[in-house]
Image (cartoon, grey):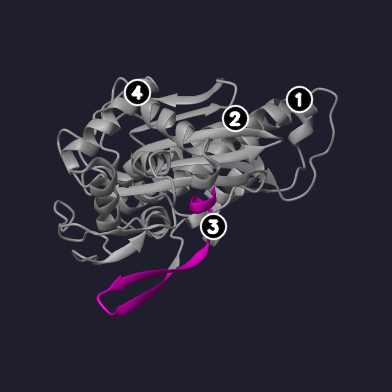
Amino acid sequence: MSRRKRGMILWIILSMDLVLAMAVGIYVFFSEWIPECLKGTPPYRAVASGNVISLEAESELPKSPLNQITPSEITAAIENNYHDNFQSCFQAEAAYVVDEYGEVLFAQNEHSKLYPASTTKMMTAYLALMYTEDLDAWITVDELTGCYETDSWLIYLKPGDRISMRDLLYALLMCSYNDAATAIAMEIGGSLEGFAEMMNTQLAEIGAEETHFVTPHGLHDEDHYTTAYDLNLILQMACEVESLREIMMTEEVTIEIYRGDETLVYDLENSSFFLKGAYDVPTMEYVGGKTGYTEKAGSCLASVFEYEDTWYYSTIMKTEDAPYMTTMLFDYYFAPEELAAFSATIPLMRD
């Protein structure tokens, strides 16, 4: 055998001896260093809860007086996980939540100027109820303008149609029809400009100083804007009117439009995700609200929930899914266990 080959074999043997010695040394070191409470413990597995990943033993850890975890520590860890889940998942440009006594639960960019989309219709409905003596009296639809944009929600009213104000309000709040909003504005204000003036006067009366309205429906206009704070004031004002809340909470209704000698009958179904049961807050009762969406406004939602005889007013603006964010927000404060399960099973909108 050549000298070169004998040298290579000797180098390999010495290297193996060195690796073996290092392994023995590491074992001895960690045998002395690892606390007794961890020796002989079962393997761990990764457990995901929302966006938080932790380690959990396959079976109960052996107890040790040096490393016992107290109930308060467990509670604190769980609360931190809920907080982390919420902070990771809640995605909205602005939000504001206050109870009926004025206590603020949550505020995020509540004074930022944003577009309200169809949440505007709460103001339109409020003025209609304030200035209409008989909701069942027939009105005649005038020429309608400003509501026939692409993708606009319409019931396709025509000039000369006869319909009651009550049925217009059902179409407005249950299905968010924009021509219903325009018909109401023309009837109450005499013109769109006259109705816009009435809206802004009412905004000033409730202290909504960061808001300016120019349309009765909320289709995009650069001069039509509000904030999460002011939208909350509008929500509170609207929900003080019992008949308005009743229309918001109507699940199904039949309305009639008289067009010449023809009677058009429409069966309307409320578009609210909370009334449909697509979303819910397990510990709270949904009282009412109004959705809104345009491309520039994003998804918006003004909603009211009741918990232990107290009303909570929530406004979420410019997000991808306002009902989902509303549910998450209330779960964070009133049902954190539900939040943990909810956020673990439903993908984040950004994903």
Residue shown at 20%/61% (left/top)? 151
Whether tag 4 and tag 3 are in contact, CB under 8 A, the answer is: no
Q: Which mark is residue 208?
A: 4
Which of 53/159 is in front? Answer: 159
Q: Which mark is residue 275?
A: 3
Which of 86/165 is in front? Answer: 165
- For the stretch drawn in magenta, the main secondary structure is strand
Whether residue 175 is situated above or below residue 43 in the rendered picture: below
Please name which of the two marks, 3 or 2, marks the residue nearer to the observer: 3
Q: Is residue 319 visible to the viewer in this orientation of the structure?
A: no
Q: Tell me the kind of residue under disc 4.
A: Ala
Going from the N terminus, do you reach mark 1 or mark 4 first? 1
Q: Tell me the kind of residue under disc 1.
A: Ser
Q: Check disc 2 and report the residue beneath it.
A: 80
Residue shown at 35%/23% (left/top)? 208
**Where is residue 99 shown, x and y percent of the image?**
57, 27
Whether residue 124 is situated above or below residue 273 in the rendered picture: above
Residue 251 forms part of the magenta stretch: yes
Secondary structure under badge 1?
A: helix
Residue shown at 42%/49% (left/top)? 348
Label 2 and label 4: CA atoms lie apart by: 36 Å
Secondary structure under badge 2?
A: helix
Magenta segment: 246-267
Please name which of the two marks, 4 or 3, marks the residue nearer to the observer: 4
Going from the N terminus, do you reach mark 2 or mark 4 first? 2
| Label 1 environment density (alpha carbons within 10 Å; few <14, some 14–19, many ≥20) | few
